[in-house]
Image: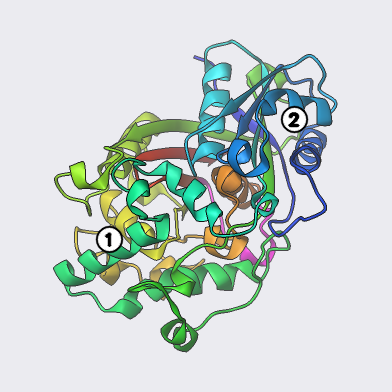
Amino acid sequence: MEKVYITGIGQVAVGEHWDQSLAALSSKAIRAALKDAGDPQPEIVYIGNFLASSISHQANLGALVCDAAGLHGLEGTTVEAGEASGAAALHMGYLAITSNMADCVVVVGLEKMTDMVGDEIEAFAAQSGDTDFEGMQGLTPNGMAGLLMQRYLDQYHAPCESFASFPITAHANGVNNPFAMYRKNVDLDSYGKAPMVSVPLSLYDVPTFADGAAALVLVNRKLLRDGQKAVLISASEIATDTLAVHDRADPLAFDAVHISTTKALEKAKLTRDCLDLFECWDTPSIYGMLSLEAGGFAERGRGWQFATLDNLALTGRLPVATLGGIKAHGFAPGAAGAYQVLDAVQQLRGEAGRNQIASAQVAMTQAISGAAASVITHILRKM
C-alpha cells in the first residue's frame, strides 16, 4: 500500500467574502497549495462541501472548481459528509493514493455561507442531523448541542464555566493566525456574561458561519522531492453512529469518536501519549468535551476536569485549537475539516509562528458532522 504525503497547503482567510464566488475562493486555495508543493500535475480533485447546492444554488462543483483553477479535463468530484466534508474529501484523496489510482491528488474544502442571509441558513445546516425526527421539529444544530450540554451538566454536576476552556484557548491561539476570523482574546468574565444561544449554550460556545477554502496536495513517495517539508498521513479513519440522537443508548457517549480514534491510533501504531497536538472539533464546546472523553483522553464524566486552560494550552498536556480551531477561525462547514489538517501541517512543518509547539512530531485531527453521527480522524507525522 502506497504511503501518502501532504506536500502543499493553501488557504484563504475565513470570513465574509461577499465579493468572492465559490470558484474564486477555491481557485485561490488550490493555486497556493500547488505552488507550495512545487507545481506537480494532479490527476484528481476532491471537493469537500456541505451546503453549496442549498445556499449557493450551485451543484457540480467538480467541473466548477477544476475549471476555475485551470485544471481542465481533470477528474473532479464533490464529497459530502455534512460539516466533516473537508475531512471526508481528504479521506478520499488518501484512498486514491494508497490504492495506486493516482500519484497526485488535490483536496479542497469549500463553503460560502454568505450566499444566503436569514434564518433559512439554520434549516439547511440542520440537514446534517435527522430531518424527520429533529429538523422537522425545529431542532437546530445549536439546539441539539444545548440539549446535550444540559444533560451533561445535570448528569455529571460539572460547572458551566468548565466549558470556557475551549473558546478561551481557541481565541488566544487565533490572535496570531492571520487567516482566522476572530483575532481577539476572550476571558472567563466575558464568557460568563455572553448571551445565551440555546440554554446553557452561550454565544462563546458556538461557531460563527463564514466563507472559506483550504486546499492540500497529496502525493505518493515517487513524487517526493528533496528538501520538501512533507507530512505523512499515518491514518485516515471514518466511523458513523445513528443519525438520530434519540436512537442511541447513551447520547453523551459519542461512539463514532471512540471508534474512529481507536482505529486511527491502531493503524498508525501509536498511543494517545504520542500525540503532540489534537485539532479537535472544539465548537460547540460540549462537542469538544465529549470528544476528549470518547477519544480516551479523559474518563467519562470527567472531561471537564481534564479540559483546563493549562492542559489545552500550547504548552499543555494536549494542545488543541493551536491556530484558533473552529471557534476563532470561523466556521466554513465544508472547509472546516481541511482547515484543521492544514493547521496541523503548519505545526509539523514548524511554520506556526508564535503558536509553534516545540518539537511537534505527531498530530491528530478530528472532524465531526451532526452530533457526532460521522467522525473522521487523521493522524499526521513529521517526516
Per the image, label 2 sits on a secondary structure element best described as helix
Per the image, label 1 sits on a secondary structure element best described as helix
Q: From mark 1 to mark 2, how far is it between C-alphas?
A: 37 Å
Please tell me whether residue 52 belongs to the stretch shown in magenta: no
Side (left or right) of 234 relative to 45: left
Q: Is residue 251 visible?
A: yes
Q: Residue at x 67, y 62 (%)?
A: 180
- Taking depth in this image into account, of 168 and 284 the one nearest to the observer is 284
Amino acid under label 1? Answer: Leu
- Taking depth in this image into account, of 71 and 206 the one nearest to the observer is 206
Amino acid under label 2? Answer: Val
Q: Earlier in the sequence, mark 1 or mark 2?
A: 2
Residue indicated by mark 1: 148
Whether label 1 touches label 2, CB < 8 Å: no
Q: Residue at x 82, y 31 (%)?
A: 68
Q: Quadrant of residue 107?
A: top right
Residue 376 horizontal/vertical position (percent): 43, 38
Identify whether 267 is placed above or below 343: above
Q: Classify 10 Å Cα crowding around label 1: few (below 14), some (14-19), many (20 and above).
A: many
Q: Find the magenta span and give its range.
A: 350-362
Residue 176 horizontal/vertical position (percent): 68, 68
Residue indicated by mark 2: 65
